[in-house]
Image (cartoon, rainbow, N blue to C red):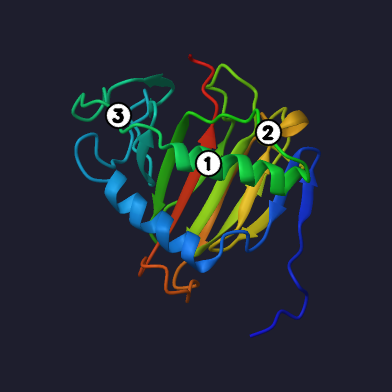
C-alpha cells in the first residue's frame, strides 16, 4: 500500500538523521539470522540489571565489547563471564555505509567496534538516556528490524522537552552524531504486529546499534 505522505530522509536535529527503508529485504533477513546466532551462548542475550537492582525490559546481547550498566568489559561479567562475541568486519562496513547514507558523504574513518543488539517484546520500552559509556564521540548507528517503535529523540541537556517522536519501521536507519551525539533518547513503545515483511522475525523488534568504544 502506498504512503499518503511518503517517508523521506529527515534531519531530526543537527547531526541526527532518519533514513526510512534503508535496509532492503535481503539485508533485513541477513541481520535477523545473524542476531539469532549472536543471541545464543556463550555470553547469551539477557535482560540487564541496573546497579540499583532494576531489570531492563529489553533483552541485550553484545558484540566486540560487553556492555553492562554502565561499563564495557571483554567478558560477560554479569552473565556467565564468557568472552564476548567478536565484532564482525562486515557489520563495520555496513556501519560505514550507514553513516555515508545519513550524512551524504563517504565515511571511511568510521570504525565501530561494539554493537548492542536489543530485542523488544510487545511491552518492552527504553527510558530516555544518553549513550556516554564510550570514550569516543563518533556517531551512533541504529538499525531497526521487525515491529515498529516510537523513538523519542530529545536534547543534550536533560530528559525534558524539547524532543521529537519518530516512528522507526523495519529497515529504517537512524544515525546521531556531532551536536546530537549525546542527546537523550529512548523508545516510548513498540507497535505489536506492525511488521508484515517476511524477515524471519514473527514478533517483536530488534534494534542494532553500532558504536566506537574508544577503548583501543
Q: Residues within 10 Å of mark 1 (few under 14, many from 20)?
A: some
Residue at which label 3 appears: 84
**Badge 3 element:** loop
Q: Residue at x 26, y 22 (%)?
A: 77
In the image, residue 42 lies at what x, y percent? Answer: 20, 35
Q: Residue at x 42, y 20 (%)?
A: 71
Asked if residue 35 is positioned above or below residue 113 in the image, the reply reads: below
**Badge 1 element:** strand
Q: Earlier in the sequence, mark 1 or mark 3?
A: 3
Q: Residue at x 72, y 30 (%)?
A: 156
- Is residue 158 visible in the rendered image? The answer is yes
Residue at which label 1 appears: 127
Q: Quadrant of residue 115?
A: top left
Mark identifier at residue 183: 2
Mark 1 vs mark 2, foreground winner is 2
In the image, residue 204 lies at what x, y percent? Answer: 40, 62
Relative depth, front residue between 139 and 109: 109
Amino acid at each position: 500500500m502506498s504512503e499518503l505522505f511518503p517517508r523521506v530522509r529527515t534531519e531530526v536535529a543537527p547531526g541526527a538523521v532518519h533514513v526510512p527503508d534503508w535496509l532492503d529485504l535481503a539485508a533485513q533477513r541477513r541481520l535477523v539470522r545473524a542476531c539469532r546466532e549472536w543471541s545464543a551462548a556463550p555470553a547469551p542475550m539477557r535482560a540487564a540489571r541496573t546497579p540499583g537492582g532494576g531489570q531492563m525490559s529489553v533483552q541485550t546481547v553484545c558484540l566486540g565489547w560487553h556492555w553492562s550498566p554502565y561499563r564495557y568489559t571483554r567478558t560477560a561479567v554479569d552473565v556467565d563471564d564468557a568472552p564476548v562475541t567478536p565484532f564482525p568486519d562486515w557489520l563495520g562496513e555496513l556501519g560505514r555505509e550507514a553513516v555515508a547514507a545519513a550524512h551524504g558523504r563517504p565515511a571511511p574513518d568510521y570504525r565501530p567496534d561494539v554493537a548492542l543488539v536489543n530485542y523488544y517484546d510487545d511491552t518492552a520500552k527504553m527510558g530516555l538516556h544518553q549513550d556516554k559509556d564510550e570514550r569516543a564521540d563518533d556517531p551512533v548507528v541504529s538499525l531497526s528490524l521487525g515491529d515498529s517503535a516510537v523513538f523519542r529523540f530529545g536534547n543534550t541537556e536533560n530528559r525534558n522537552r524539547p524532543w521529537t517522536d519518530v516512528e522507526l519501521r523495519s529497515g529504517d536507519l537512524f544515525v546521531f552524531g556531532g551536536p546530537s551525539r549525546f542527546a537523550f533518547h529512548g523508545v516510548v513503545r513498540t507497535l505489536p504486529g506492525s511488521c508484515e515483511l517476511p524477515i524471519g522475525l514473527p514478533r517483536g523488534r530488534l534494534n542494532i546499534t553500532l558504536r566506537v568504544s574508544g577503548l583501543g
